[in-house]
Image (cartoon, rainbow, N blue to C red):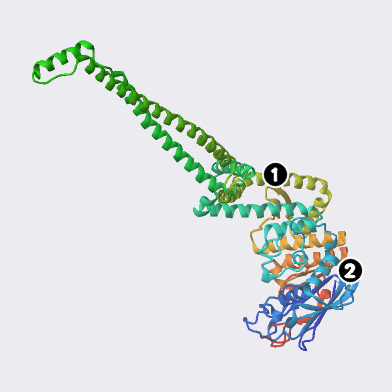
Amino acid sequence: MIHSIFSTLPTFKALDFKPGLNVLLAQKEKGASNKQTRNRAGKTSLIELIHFLTGSKAKPSSLFRLEALSSETFGMEFELGGKRITVERRGKDFSKLIVTGIDVPGKKNRISNPDWIEILGNQIFGLDEVPGVDGRVPKFRSLFAYFARRQLSGAFSSPEKQAEKQQLGDSQLALMFLLGLDWQITSDWQKVRDREKILKELKKAAGAGAFGSIIGKTADLRTQLTVAEARLQELEKQIDSFKVLPKYRELETEADQITLAINTLANDNTIDMAVIRDLEGALKIEAPPSLNDLETVFAEAGIALPGLTLKRYDEVRDFHESIVSNRRDYLSEELSAAKQRIETREKQKSKLDQRRAEVMGFLKSHGALDQYSRLQGEANKMKAEVESLQRRFDSAEQLEGTKTELEIERNRLVLRLRRDFVEQKKLLAEAILAFEEISKRLYESAGSMTVDKTMNGPVFQFPMQGSRSKGITNMQIFCFDLMLMQLCAKRGIGPGFLAHDSHLFDGVDGRQLIRSLKVGAETAEKFGFQYIVTMNEDDAYKETEAGFDLRKYVLPVVLTDATEDGGLFGFRF
């Protein structure tokens, strides 16, 4: 519980609290105009001050960082872990607090705000005993805000949310923890939502065009990846078996020269083969004329040349036979020479071909260094392509397959939630009955609290007649907060106090308002917690409730906005 709130500000109205119900009133002075509505009396500022002293961020817009207040120290004396301690903080150096009455290992009484939040979380909610999980875990500031709802955060929109912008996963996690249920289920649910958000963004980007062309479809990418991997394996095998030959280029040149020489010899052989054919043809037709033909020619020569003395026929015949014989010998010699040349070339060709085979064998089993480098370069390029295709394939599979996986995971979480509800049936029943009992004391037709398991986690609902009105919604919040305090008091967790701003009672019927204060006072006394309420004086006394005297719970300090010094801080700024 809170014992007192104070400040170094001389005009600040220090507040002393007692166990049970404490009501801080803001009154409207006689003769005050309608514009003087007590909206600046400091009722909401009290809630902000409690948050300031329990580790709120104190943003630049914070009330306590205004020039008029930033140099002033504000403090609170309250119970923490069974000890009476004091905490002090000022806006000028909001990152540090002065805490007395508690030992902080390795530190003096001046500690950082994150350390203070950790201490409060461990002492108030036992967060040091929370098991480490891969996901979100309960946080002190999120849990504490249910026990001191802030109008500035929009805390009076619905019972299950302590801030208008509170995320679903955060509210589910906090309530499951405060009700004693398995909060890790909601932590895992948030991981599913986070993955779905990423998937949604990826699909959105893919649908935009450029990103879609980069990722591609799974079927197409699988084919491209398979082909690229096979090509890479082939290149790697070639590299593994590659042998570098230093004189590769010299042998390559020799092989080319041998080929050229062989081709030249072959061409020369072709020419000689033609010569042989011609010579063989000439030998066939090279024969002496018959004796009858020679005699006829000789006789005709004597008639045609009567005055010329001719040699004898025998001498002519012998001469002719000598010429034919000489011609045949010449052709035979030329034919033999051509054949000899061809034979010689064939032997040269055989030797050259054998050498070329040796050279080509080396060239086939070895390679040049620059060829090896090019092969490695091609393999590295293919490896990069395979890696790129693999990433694209994984992304495409994630896009196409994650949705199904997340649906399966959601079904698993529903089963876990159902099992937890069965195992914690007693705790759920206690919360439901407590909410209904409190509601029943305010309205003839009692409201109720339902906790349902859905594909999006646990859903808390509060059906109540007339729940569309602002006043009824606020009373749902009242019942819910009082139920939480009751359950937390039984479990021995929580700050030990509940603080409600006057905004909670906006639109609430006078009979329900005074009745709610009675219920709050009786519940606080029964379960041993402190209930702090700020409200307007004329609202507080509109109605009366039998057996309940509000005046005994009203603090001696009374606020007003009718005068310059009537507010909590004692001046207007």
x%, y% of residue 351? 52, 35
Quadrant where the C terminus sits is: bottom right
Q: Nearer the viewer, residue 455 or 4?
A: 455
Q: Residue at x 80, y 64 (%)?
A: 519
Q: Amino acid at mark 1?
A: Asn
Q: Write down the residue under mark 2.
A: 81
Q: Amino acid at mark 2?
A: Gly
Above/below status of 438 relative to 66: above
Left or right of 523? Residue 43 is left
x%, y% of residue 463? 69, 54
Left or right of 315? Residue 441 is right
Quadrant where the N terminus sits is: bottom right
Above/below status of 469 relative to 236: below
Q: Is residue 207 visible?
A: yes
Q: Residue at x 50, y 36 (%)?
A: 352
Mark 1 element type? helix
Left or right of 73? Residue 38 is left
Mark 2 element type? loop
Q: Is residue 568 visible?
A: no
Q: Residue furthest top?
A: 292
Q: Write down the residue under mark 1.
A: 411
Mark 2 vs mark 1: in front:
1
Q: Which quarter of the figure has residue 449?
A: bottom right
